[in-house]
Image: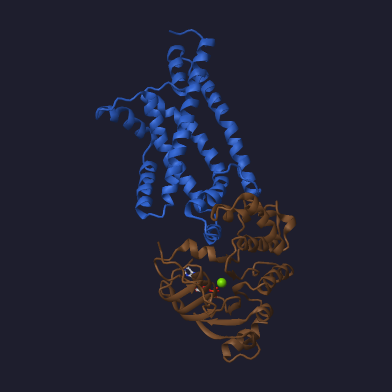
Amino acid sequence: MGGSLNLNHLLFLLQGAGWTVVLSVLALVGGGILGFAVALCRVSASRAVRLVSGGYVQLIQGTPLLVIMFLTYFGLPAIGFRISPLAAAGASLTIYVGAYLGEIWRGAIQSVPRPQWEAAEGLALSRTQRMTRVILPQAVRIATPPTVGFFVQIIKNTSLASVVGFVELARSGQIINNSLFEPFLIYSIIAVIYFVLCYPLSRLSRRLERRAGQGRGQTLAPA
Amino acid sequence: MSPAPTSATGQDPAVRLSDVHKSFGTNKVLDGVSFDVPRGSVTTIIGRSGSGKSTALRCIDRFERIDRGEITVCGHRVHEPSLDLRALRLDVGIVFQSYNLFPHLTVEENIILAPTAVKKMPKAEARELARRVLAQVGLEEKLHAYPEQLSGGQQQRGAIARSLAMQPKVMLFDEVTSALDPELTGEVLKVIEQLAADGMTMVLVTHEMAFARGIADQVVFMHRGKVHEIGPAAILSSPATQELAQFVGTGL
Ligand SMILES: Nc1ncnc2c1ncn2[C@@H]1O[C@H](COP(=O)(O)OP(=O)(O)O)[C@@H](O)[C@H]1O
Ligand SMILES: [Mg+2]
């Protein structure tokens, strides 16, 4: 044991950072798909669908991500489902992110002014057409800044995957520190890497917010 | 399938309200409203704020459901649960007080959306149509502008053009000029006057008394959820009731 920080250690940290990115992307894609479905369910015409999706959001928002991770990684095998650390972390993040993005996007959909919904109705557009052609394109513009901002939180939250034995950035730092005993140096490096991952997104989020405030007449992303 | 609209004979009014009642909670907003709008004619609804004008208009296009009574629009029995809502809205165009062109679409895209999506009109044909209806409202040069680049008056004319592109049989207007600066009001009213001259059946809620008088074949004066006085535009010059006299007196 012991020794000093060398290139191999740094490469190991970068590999951990790579897994942090992989987890974050998994969480965004999985959580994004689930969140989109949740948002649509939350504004559904059916009361039952609204209630069930609302219950899901309440349940997840009232549960720490850490507990969701424990439940999928240790809980599922206990009732007979074996699951890898990556799958457990990915699934947990998807479930967690889906609830929060669903809520952010529901808010965005509902903040499209009522006259816009009625104008679309008055033109005889079907419910699906109203959603896809009128409401969602406007909701996307409203939702983009908070979504990017939330993604920054996700990147940092992936560090919790270390509790299920997944070696991402924070865990790889721990491992190296266990052999080098240079906690200040190593965790400073870890912090810098997280910062490098998150800062551009934070900047982007703030820029988008300013732009949304000005309200340019162009779509950011058509639905 | 819901029942097909009864075929229109020349005698059927385009819109008929019979003893329409509507409450929001305990607030009785329409209290037995009845009037007919003959085909090709213009009816203006006037009255104090809160008298139920907008609600009456919104009931015609089934944005509100009524509690009691009957509404028939171009053969559609609006009060019945079996109403074919889409068919109703194909026959009725509505323009609201607030600007509601879709902000993420250009004026042209706003106009061709419903014809292409609902009527499956080919895009080229819809673009041609967009040019025509924009010419009708004097907005040809704004084809590719976004709503936020337009004045309030231009936005309202754009919204009228968007409705016209669906070739409705009846047009409803709810105080479409009341959010506008006075100097922009005229351009919108002129467009509506031209529509009237072209024979469009229209129901319009307005507080522009001179305009209401000039354009109306029939004036409906609403007061506390009731049709308090109804008749030709001349009733504005010689009101039969004290309430209308007072309203006209303060409204001018
Ligand atoms: N969606 C609604 N929910 C509850 N009350 C409403 C609603 N729409 C209108 N009202 C009430 O109905 C009354 C008549 O409103 P409205 O038809 O808008 O009158 P007007 O257009 O003549 O000013 C008002 O007291 C208003 O507050
Ligand atoms: Mg009103």
Task: Using the image as rendered, state which of residue A119 and residue B79 is in the foreground.
Answer: B79
Q: Colour of chain A?
A: blue
Task: Using the image as rendered, state which of residue A209 and residue B7 is in the foreground.
Answer: B7
Q: Colour of chain B?
A: brown
Residue ID at (52%, 57%):
A117
Figure quadrant of the N terminus of chain B = bottom left
Q: Position of residue A6 (x, y in %)?
A: 53, 10
Q: As drawn, is B22 to the left or to the right of B195?
A: left
Q: Quadrant location of residue A221?
A: top right
Q: Position of residue B107 (x, y in %)?
A: 66, 54
**Total labels drawn:** 0
Residue ID at (50%, 26%):
A21
Residue B224 seen in the current view: no
Residue ID at (44%, 19%):
A174
Residue B187 seen in the current view: yes
Q: Position of residue A15 (x, y in %)?
A: 49, 18
Q: As drawn, is B29 to the left or to the right of A80?
A: right
Display coloring: by chain
Task: Using the image as rendered, state which of residue A66 and residue B120 is in the foreground.
Answer: B120
Q: Quadrant location of residue B247?
A: bottom right
Q: Does A127 sit above or below residue B12?
A: above
Q: Position of residue A118 (x, y in %)?
A: 53, 60
Figure quadrant of the C terminus of chain B = bottom right
Task: Using the image as rendered, state which of residue B245 and residue A211 is in the foreground.
Answer: B245
Residue furthest to the left: A79
